[in-house]
Image (cartoon, grey):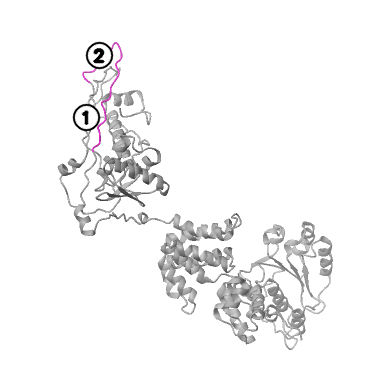
Amino acid sequence: MSYLVLARKYRPRNFSEMVGQEHVVQALTNALTQQRLHHAYLFTGTRGVGKTTVSRILAKSLNCQGPDGKGGITATPCGVCPACTDIDSGRFPDYTELDAASNRGVDEVQSLLEQAVYKPVQGRFKVFMIDEVHMLTNTAFNAMLKTLEEPPEYLKFVLATTDPQKVPVTVLSRCLQFNLRPMAPETVLEHLTRVLGTENVPAEPQALRLLARAARGSMRDALSLTDQAIAFGSGQLQEAGVRQMLGSVDRSYVFRLIEALARGDGKTIVETSDALRLNGLSAASTLEEMSAVLQRMAVLQAVPQMADAVDAADPEAVETARLAGLMPADETQLLYSICLHGRGELGLAPDEYAALTMALLRLLAFKPTDAAAGSVEKKTLAPAETRSAERVAAPAPALPTAPAVAVAAVPGLPEPSASLPPKELAPAAVAVHAPPVALPVRSIEEVAQKLPPEPAPEPQRPPEVVAIPVRVPPEPGARLQPLPASATGAAAARYTPTPEGDVWHATVQQLVAAEAVTALVRELALQSQLVAREADHWMIRVERESLNQPTARERLRAALEAAGHARQLTVEVGAVIDSPARRNAAAAAERQRVAEEIVMNDPLVQTLMREHGAKIVPGSIKPA
């Protein structure tokens, strides 16, 4: 006796045996029970989800005669009457299956439709089942439209396809469409457990989980893989044998990689990638398994309540839950995207394992900083008790005032009495987004002793005053529209004063003025923040990794040593809240704001705007 494969041996014979398609079973069962039958059905879905099986069960339900030969249309075919047994064996004369992949022309369709004029021979209905109907030609579709729309009362059409987008709309509109969904791995696992229990085949649960995932929603694929695994394992299913047969990556490698990425351990990442190469495991499969684990981790992080429903019998689920608590949610999302894009890059690289290593190390290069959480902590090289004594409150930087605005005169008119003096404005408060820190206060005189003396301001020339023709003197208390906010960069010139900010700003300004630092070294100094000083050892922080180059670090250290500041320099990458560049930008923004306010408050300018419709061109006001 020849062996019957599991996919055929355990093909469902009635609706109650269908697995994973409850929505289709319920609709067809109710329709059969209430005798509300459509003349054409279209079943869509991927391979191995039960399209042909449903069509055969539907044909048996329409033609079942019951065990006693007196039955009618039913949702539960008996399976023992001649109609049921003949349909199962494929020899029922009133049930015709046409493979449209090999019979796709108009001649084959016309031959099938010629049989529609004859009534059923044995059954109650003629059933024409056309599999892979999307393979028919346009002429063949057009030939069957009329019969499909108004078939005889004894004729039923059942169409099945894996690609409904290729079926003409004229055909879709004539059919009752059912979409058979891919089955979840849990559903496949449960069915495989029942089948192997019936077959008395010992199987490890983890081996069945591997088969259920490898089936990708197809029950036929799952049963076919199970047949292959039984043959590979000599009658038993073990995890190691199934994994070797499938060529899938052991998830212990995946868990090791994700944990190393969470801890920032680049050495373990490279060693694990080399182990995958030595064992001949697929790099694409590794990224695919990582994507599956990361997706589950993201769900557990977004919905912590689901962690309580983790199956304790599944070691992979327990390990996934542990890693979900180890890696931040933003890193999980970033790593998931990197794995998806990394699969597309494997074919572009000369070595897929090198591409795998680069994809994994990419997370370490783009790992989110702690600044995103709003916590900025001052680092230092000195002990904790020494640090607390050295913290001081940084004074607000002195902002230069804007020059007076000169008004040109017009010949023949009286001159104004005097030029408009600049208004003395208090320095504007700088927006601070970092949490407040209680620091010991030191007198301004003590801080000023360590700062270099400010250069004496240059004497200003008396402004040239020229009168402007004005018809009516300005009305007192007149309110005008303020000048729109120009793109002066004030929003970007925000910084938080730090205890070491004044010292570093003065030092960098001195180096830049003396041209001791240029090009990339100057940018490193301007964009960095001094976070700690200890004797001759200074530590600075910079946001961009591109500025942290060995050559630039060494040149900046040499310039600081030549200026008598520090002999050793340490550069770290992190969030910067106080840098010379930010201080310079804040000072420039304040000068621009003062200049614009002076111009806007000028009575003559207000009169021109009110009486003559004058407008100030944005960006035209520049402090001298």
Per the rendering, the mark at residue 456 is 1
Any part of residue 198 in sight: yes
Per the rendering, the mark at residue 65 is none
Residue 42 horizontal/vertical position (percent): 69, 66
**Extreme residue toward the bottom, this view:** 68
Residue stretch in magenta = 398-418
Any part of residue 211 in sight: no
Inspect the image, locate mark 1, and give the three-letter code of the amino acid beneath it. Answer: Ala
Residue 127 horizontal/vertical position (percent): 76, 72
Image quarter in which the N terminus is found:
bottom right
Inspect the image, locate mark 2, and give the three-letter code of the amino acid beneath it. Answer: Pro
Name which residue lies at 20% across and 50% down.
392
Name which residue lies at 30% across and 14% down.
410
501 or 382: nearer the eye? 382
Mark 1 is surrounded, within 10 Å at the Cα level, by few (under 14), some (14 to 19) or many (20 or more) other residues, namely few
Q: Nearer the viewer, mark 2 or mark 1?
A: 1
